[in-house]
Image (tube, rainbow, N blue to C red):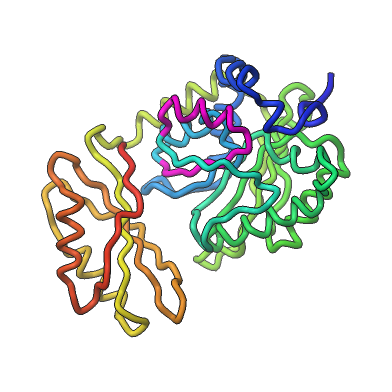
Amino acid sequence: MSRPEHIAPPELFYGEAEAEKYTRNSRIAAIQAEMTMRAVELLNLADDQPRFLLDIGCGSGLSGEILDEDGQLWVGVDIAPAMLDIAVDKDVEGDLFLQDIGQGLGFRPGTFDGAISVSVLQWLCNADKTENKPRYRLQRFFSTLFMALQRGARAVFQFYPENDAQVEQIMGVAMKCGFTGGLVVDYPNSKKARKFYLCLFAGQAPSGRKQELPKGLASEEAPDSRIADYYMSVKQKKALPAEKSIVVLEVKPWDSDTDLDAMEAMIRGIEMDGLVWSKVAKRIPLGYGIERLDIYAVVENDKVSVEGLIETIKGFEDYVQSVDEGAFVKL
């Protein structure tokens, strides 16, 4: 049977009919869910706070639904308009972008805490057009992905390599772009259940601890069992009520001399009924030595006005030049 990437480019192969068929197939959905769960597991994320993830080749949002269940924030990119149309109709939580990853990613440096991809990477190795040279497309993709990730973050790709040479080509380009890591093979002795995951590290972890390549799964479990166990573990986590949302506030200081530690402490000192500050806070370089503070919070929608919270932060006039709502995601 011909591999899909040998039949047509992805944006043509996944037209309206194929995209609808793919999304409605319960067996495909179950397999996609299992592989997404495994990819998230290999990211080795902390359980105590949401992370901002990139879903590469998000399709119709099947993987995004798993990320939602896991309490993560996410952005999805895909090259097939028909797939994204279905995701939009499903009203998925993540933001969606129509993009050919072989032309590179357009996100700012250090945007994401991790990235996952299911059944996508092998498409970059196929020269389906005269101008598409696999090595160059892989290089543009991996180099821009490395920039878009926080240092120490992981990117996990489940993919279907055609042969050993393809694996070597993919890994070789990824390493030249700055990544470390390697191949994780689950169920290596099972021809039917064997799965390949490329687990990449974007530099050393902030703690300074050496990143270790995870081990593959050796004993085969039925997919339905793994999915059931996963959803049970999600339900056992401390879940936030549906009337709560995650908000990301982008706080810009006046200049490079502004004490960001003091500014963050003042912001975290704001107390409101229904407001819980997350431990997550990022400093995003803007240029000329100036860094913007991105600070996360969980708000109870019927108790906290985000606009009112922004005005309160703007009240710290000696530190704060402007405040924008960077993201608002309902839980």
Reply above or below: 24 against 321.
above
Instruction: Report x, y in % for residue 275.
Output: 18, 50
126 is within the stretch colored magenta: no
Residue at (31%, 36%) from the top-left corner?
Answer: 331
Place of residue 102 in the rendered image (x, y in percent of width and height, measured from the top left): 70, 48
Which residue lies at the image location 15% right of the left edge and 47% below the top edge? 304
Q: Is residue 114 above or below residue 225?
A: below
Q: Nearer the viewer, residue 53 or 253?
A: 253
| Residue 11 seen from this side | yes
Q: Does any portion of residue 28 appear in the rendered image?
A: no
Q: Is residue 109 above or below residue 48?
A: below
* Residue range of the region highlighted in magenta in the rendering: 72-92
- Seen at 18% across and 75% down, the residue is 317
List x then y, in percent, for residue 185.
72, 38
Image quarter for residue 17? top right
Q: Nearer the viewer, residue 217 or 1?
A: 1
Q: Quadrant of the N terminus?
A: top right
Q: Position of residue 103 (x, y in %)?
A: 68, 51
Q: How many marks?
A: 0
Q: Examine the image and state in which quarter residue 323 appears.
A: bottom left
